[in-house]
Amino acid sequence: MQEKCGVVGIAHADTPVARSLYDALYALQHRGQEAAGIVTHDGFQQHQHVEVGLVGDAFDERDLESLQGRAGIGHVRYPTQGSLERSCAQPFSISFKGGALGLSHNGNLVNTAECRDALADAGHTFTSTGDSEVIAHELAHQLLEHDVVEAVRQLMDRVHGSYSLTIMYDDEVMGVRDPLGNRPLCIGKVDDGYILASESSAIDTLGGELVRDVRPGELVRLARDGSGYTSDQIVEVDHPAHCFFEYVYFARPDSTMEGHLVYEIRRELGRQLWQESGIETDVVIPVPDSGRAFASGYAEASTGVEFAEGLMKNRYVGRTFIMPTQDERERAVRAKLNPIRSTIEGKTVTLIDDSIVRGTTSKQLVKLLRAAGAREVHLRIGSPPIRAPCYMGIDMATREELIAHDRSLGEIETAIDADSLAYLSREAIAETLEVTFDDLCMACVTGKYPYDIEGEETDRHISSRVARTP
Ligand code: SF4
């Protein structure tokens, strides 16, 4: 399972912005490892550098020096729509009659083809296959006829799906979050100005302070002199559809989202997991790194089950789920995680992970632990079973590939060869986040989506839920 992308936008009062954007992108590297890019504006013209690869490989000193100006946006990418090639790397930069536009997108549209066809009919040509370029062209199209606020309102009317955007319109930096707030975006104060970023850890990296989350359906414009920002609530919704997986897996544990420190949320989910399905074993061990906070909360809430590290991670192997074939994924798990025998041998073990997607990793880990001498292996999972694909920008798997898609709990337990298996309930997640189900997207668990998607069920209708502000 792979996060979609990370976005950032910064406006400084006095100092060049390129290095701050670079540092912020480094902090967001976990949200996309396939390409990185920056667009700045020096008051006269835009400068752009995008490259395939990690942030550290995509830029050198010369690149940063060429990215002149006190305002800019950046992007780290994992392709969700559009093939993996340089032309899909972001930020997109386009020049049109109304000026110069740069755009970074995190999310996924569910009506790309419809929007693309309408724009093509209006004479727009595209250089990539992705949905982000469609958003850039749609916005440019609207900016020819409208001011910024009305153009964003028109954009929100036309494009449907998840999008957190940072936008560079001439020398102005803006941020937009889709009306359901599916993907995160926050505002921060840094030394010499203001920043918009997917996660607050990017703000921390610059020594800044989180101000607040951008609200669903809100447009935020950073002042060109770095003195502040203005806000326009473009549309209002009764309930957002925040992706619950940001808290469970995608976001960095040191990020704060919607008022919650992600690390503390994961620890609390671990405590809940103990309350719901705790089992007395000799030791509880996490799947590193994402299971660690869950396991520490689980052990803390337990009646004295020892928390220990039982799997050592090779940090130089990429995320397993990026591997395109089953065989490569299995090899990657073995290369990535190695058991610590002394923690495991002769013991009953509870293994904690954040989620199960295809089941490949879980099955292999159970096998590894048994081979290392575990007497019993009980698996506890910090989220509910994933039964349906994500159309909102998470590269998860097809429905058929998901192990829970057509299996009962007992069947999954058997397939993974665990002595017992339990997932955390949806209720525990909503309760921990202090929201109702109405305020979360849990479509990959329920199969009911917050948008109209052909062939799928919806649990709400966006058009009936979006109320325009006067
Ligand atoms: S379907 Fe799942 S992964 Fe996708 S946005 Fe909704 S909660 Fe997040």
Image (spheres, rainbow, N blue to C red):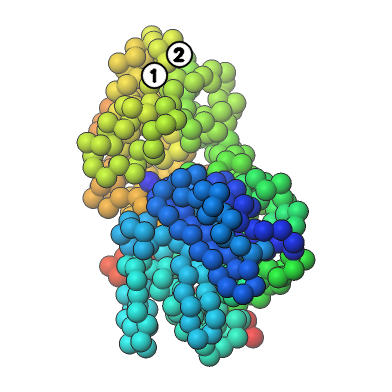
Where is mark 2, residue-wise? 343
Q: Residue at x 66, y 51 (%)?
A: 203
Q: Nearer the viewer, residue 283 or 178?
A: 178
Q: Is residue 201 above or below residue 94?
A: above
Query: In the orientation shown, which residue stands out farthest toward the front?
Result: 62
The secondary element bearing badge 2 is classed as helix
- Residue that sits furthest to the bottom in the current view: 145
220 vs 10, nearest the viewer? 10
Of circles 1 and 2, which is in front?
1
Q: Quadrant of residue 111?
A: bottom left
Q: In the picture, residue 325 is in which quadrant?
A: top left
Assign a secondary structure to mark 1.
strand
Q: Residue at x 32, y 21 (%)?
A: 368
Amino acid on which disc 1 is placed: Pro
Q: Residue at x 68, y 68 (%)?
A: 222
Is residue 98 or residue 63 the one in the foreground? Answer: 63
Above or below 439: residue 298 = above
Q: Residue 282 at what x, y percent from top left?
A: 47, 15
Q: Does the beta carbon of the residue at mark 2 sit less than 8 Å from ligand 1?
A: no
Q: Is residue 222 visible?
A: yes
Q: Amino acid at mark 2?
A: Thr
Disc 1 from disc 2: Cα separation: 8 Å
Q: Which residue is mark 1?
A: 339
The reply to whether the C-beta atoms of the residues labelled 1 and 2 are less than 8 Å apart is: yes
Q: Does 69 appear above or below 148?
A: above
